[in-house]
Each structure stands twice: as C-alpha cells, then as structure tokens.
Image (cartoon, rainbow, N blue to C red):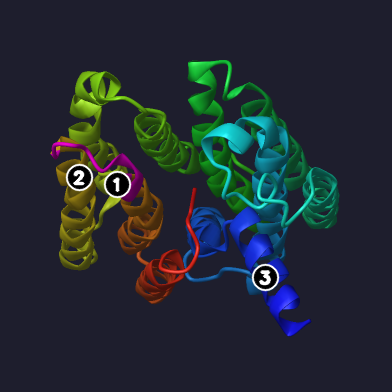
Amino acid sequence: MKGRAAETLRAYTELLRISNLPTVFSNVLVGSALGGSGANIPWEITAQCAVAVLFLYLAGVACNDAVDAEWDAVARPERPIPSGRLSQRQAYAIAVGGFLLGLTVFASIGLIAFGIGTLLVAVITLYNLLHKRLAASVVFVGAARGLVYLAAAAAVGGTLNDSKPFWFALALFAYTTAFTMMARSEHQEQIDNSRWLAAAIPLIVLAPGVWITSDEALLAAGVAVVMIVWQARAVRMVFQLPPETKSAVHVWLSGFCLIDAFYLSVLGYSGLMTVAVGCFLVTLLLQRRVMGT
C-alpha cells in the first residue's frame, strides 16, 4: 500500500512538473519589486499573488498533459497519463480546479490583477490547445511568463501606469519564446537552423539592465556574469554533436531564477535577489528528481 501511495505521489510530481515551481515564485518576486515603491512591498499581497500564480501554473501543466495524452502515448509513454499511473480525467480536474482557485485569489486582490490573471489563463489554454498544431503558439508560453511580472506588479502597485514593468515583461517574454522554439526542435536539421537563436538567448535578458543605478552596478554586474555563464552551458549543449537539446532546456528553465536574481539586483532588492538565487538552487535539486518538461 505504501508503495502504491509513493508511486501515485511520484506521478503527481511528474504531472505537475514541481521542479519548475521555484522559477514561478522568483518571477512573482520580480513582479512585486516592479510594482512596489522602494522597499515598501506589501508581503501579504505578494504571498497572495504567488499562491494565485502557482495555482495557474499547476493547472496549466496538468491541462498540457491531459490535452497531449494521445500524443504522449506514442512519443512519451513514460508520462503519468499514458503509463496508467494517473487518468486524463484527474489531470483535467486539477486543471479546472487550479484555474478557478487561481482566479479566485486574483479576484480577492483587485480588478486589474484579476484581469491579467484571466488573460494568463487564456494564453495558457491557447498554448495547450494549439502547440502541437501551430509552431507560432510558442508566443503564448512567452506571454504567460511575461504576464506573471505584470500580474504581480499590478497586484502590489494597484495599477500599471509605469512602463518599466512592461519592458521587463517583454524581455522575459522574448527569452521564454526563444528557448521554447529551441525546445520544439526534434531533428538535427531543425537544430542546425536555429542554433543562432540559442547563442542570442543570453543577450535577450540583459536589456532591462539599462535601469541599473550606480549604487547597484557592481552587484548587478556580478549577477549578470553568473547568469551569462549559466546560459552559456545551454548554448554549448545545443552546439554539440549530437545536440543535447533536452538538457539545454532544463538549463534555460532553471535560468529563470538567475534572470530574476539579476533583475532584482538591478531594481535594488539585494535581499530578494538572494531569495531568487535560493530558488535557483532548489530548482537544480528538484530537477534531479523530476523532469521540468
């Protein structure tokens, strides 16, 4: 009985891709910093926003496996649904419940946050429905990550009158879209045609560095170096023969936390930057147990 319970728990961790959860949390921290005023971040609202976004993330990945059940039965039979460890109905139940709970929490925060949360649900759903049919659907994944910044900023600040959150969200959108395009490469020819994109990915996320102040320049530069070195690992992986695309994707996924650490240092939140680095380390530990894709 204990063995079956452990197997079921393992199936849920794989379905929900729990190794990516710290990256979602660090995204919320950046959004809160973008919406906060100086050091005055309302932590209760930040916590609410983190809960809401985590619910939507869990719903999105469960929905992804439910929609892809037939495809996974052929291409990835080890996944929880085709392997028979979980049912498609269970995955859909988690998806619906997670979306509803996430939107409920956003509604308790405020109208703008709820609106962005609703848009987040829409882009997640569109990606899940279209990603096997439409290559351009990768933009929905990018939009989902960028919207997390905006949702948290709106939740904490109550508005989005400042353009700064949009520029940071745009950089995260571009990064996510770019490496998701790489993740779709299944054949050598596709990799050859898109290797240039892998080399450009580390540069995409540096753009918000223009907001660095002289007081934070040294710290932000140090974090930027660490972030670029980590991203370079993924570039090297896709330039290998044969390319290790799956391993590179996991580097890019964990890289979210280092990007967030860089942005938090740029914004002057050295304490939160340390938390984001902690999220990076936790992500690496979890990736040893649970695949992030």
Q: What's the residue type where badge 1 is placed?
A: Ala
Residue indicated by mark 1: 248
Mark 1 falls on what kind of element? Answer: helix
Q: Nearer the viewer, mark 2 or mark 3?
A: 3
Q: Residues within 10 Å of mark 2 (few under 14, many from 20)?
A: some
Q: What's the residue type where badge 3 is placed?
A: Glu
Cα distance, mark 2 to mark 1? 6 Å
**Mark 2 or 3, nearer chain start:** 3
Residue drawn at x 27%, y 39% as measured from the top left: 207
Question: Could you say where residue 189 lies in the image, as x and y percent from the top left?
Answer: 25, 19
Residue indicated by mark 2: 237
Residue indicated by mark 3: 7
Q: Quadrant of the N terminus?
A: bottom right
> What segment carries the magenta color?
240-248
Cα distance, mark 2 to mark 3? 32 Å
Relative placement, left or right, of 171 versus 152 is: left
Which of 271/148 is in front? Answer: 148
State yes or no: discs 2 and 1 in contact (Cβ < 8 Å): yes
**Mark 2 or 1, nearer chain start:** 2
Residue drawn at x 32%, y 53% as measured from the top left: 251
Q: Nearer the viewer, mark 3 or mark 1?
A: 3
Which of 203/220 is in front? Answer: 203
Locate residue 280: give its quadrant: bottom left
Rendered view: 205 above or below 45:
above
Question: Could you say where residue 235 lies in the image, as x and y percent from the top left?
Answer: 19, 42
Residue furthest bottom as drawn: 2
Which of 246/110 is in front? Answer: 246
Cα distance, mark 3 to mark 1? 28 Å
Question: Could you say where residue 118 lies in the image, as x and y percent from the top left?
Answer: 76, 37
Rendered view: 202 above or below 107:
above
Which of 7/164 is in front? Answer: 7
